[in-house]
Amino acid sequence: MGDLDSIQEQLLEKYRQGICTPEEKILVEHWYNEVSKNADTGFQEPDYVHLREEIWARLPPAVNTKRTSYLNWSRLSAAAVILVTLSAGFFLMKNYTAKQEVPADQQIANDVLPGSNKATLSLSDGSQIVLNDAKNGMLTRQGNASIVKLANGEIAYQKDNARTGVVLYNTMTTPRGGQYKLTLPDGTRVWLNAASSITYPTAFTGTQRQVNITGEAYFEVTKNKAMPFSVKSEGQMVQVLGTHFNVNTYPDESAVKTTLLEGSVKISLAGSALNKKNTELMIKPNEQSVLVNGVISKVNVDVDDIVAWKNGETTFNNSDIKSVMRQLARWYDIEVSFNGKIPEERVFSGEISRNARLSEVLKVLQLSKINFKIEGKKVIVSP
């Protein structure tokens, strides 16, 4: 019996005996709800039918008679959803936390809070504004633009037609554990993920609009056919007229990925990559360009997964534990170390609320027979 089968059988046996923890009970019941929709259970059909009847027999009468809803969702809040995919099949794990506080004896020591809206704005003269500490209203002027912090916390550049001056450049930077929203001088909206930056002019002039980024950013570009919009990142340039797209250019990831939600974009290789063949690529909505070692290609993707981060979720799609932990490290501002080798066939798909505490996320991951230990801002991962 493989690891997955063992995990499934252990939980189902505890469920039969009525000794599951509340989290395990929710997990088993949600698992059944999902596999009954998908029909691919990983079990032989006779076992599946038997387990189905056992599980539904244990649900409350009000739920048992209506098999489309199995929990009072208004009393629970989702902490994490992980689909652990192994060679033997799959296992859906969902860990919920009641709205009341977790008892002290059940909390993980040295827990880590999730990230939040925080960033630093570097002005053209080298001075900096810590945006999360700044009050709402006008922060300063740069060139012919006023920089304003709106009531919702976002930063916007408002052109002052009565003022003239040279075009200056500003840089917004988010730390690990931070994110921020920005409206550029042309009305383009930008969502900046953790450990990222964007450099841009305080006014767009001439025949093009260009910004530079590191890390990850999502754009909703204001249309202007006379002034195309470009995003320069590591090894590439993305050129658009008006569209919605996401660029992931984290240096610790294996590829630079540009994902299109709306419109069309052209990706051109930059720098040393220009001596390669096939230096340009057009992508359409629901496509993603992938740049690896100066070679660019495209694939079809689920765009909702790609931009889930800006909507308060972190998603995984057949990600190994190292990829999962890289994402968690950026959002929770933690250092990760590995003690021992995690089986390569153990991969994860699903989503996690970015509002969940780190301990809530790790408790779910631990159900896949991976162990975690929090030591301050360091997490040790072991098989």
Image: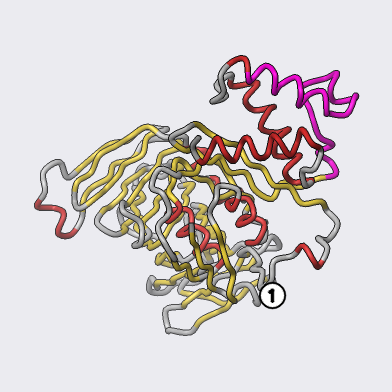
Magenta-highlighted stretch: main secondary structure?
helix
The image shows residue 330 at horizontal and vertical percentages of: 50, 64
The image shows residue 296 at horizontal and vertical percentages of: 23, 44
**What's the residue type where badge 1 is placed?**
Lys
Q: Quadrant of residue 231?
A: bottom left
Q: How many marks?
A: 1
Q: Looking at this view, is 163 or 275 the one in front?
A: 275
Name the residue that disc number 1 marks.
135
Within 10 Å of the Cα at label 1, are there few (<14), some (14-19), or many (20+) other Cα atoms? few
In percent of the image, x 60 and y 57: which residue is there? 362
Which residue appears farthest toward the right when viewing the image? 61
Assign a secondary structure to mark 1.
loop
Question: In this rendering, is residue 356 above or below 379?
Answer: above
Report the side of 236 relative to 205 (left or right): left
30 in the magenta segment? no
Q: Looking at this view, is 149 or 90 the one in front?
A: 90
The residues colored magenta run 47-75
In percent of the image, x 21 and y 50: which residue is there? 269
Q: Looking at this view, is 40 or 8 the one in front?
A: 8
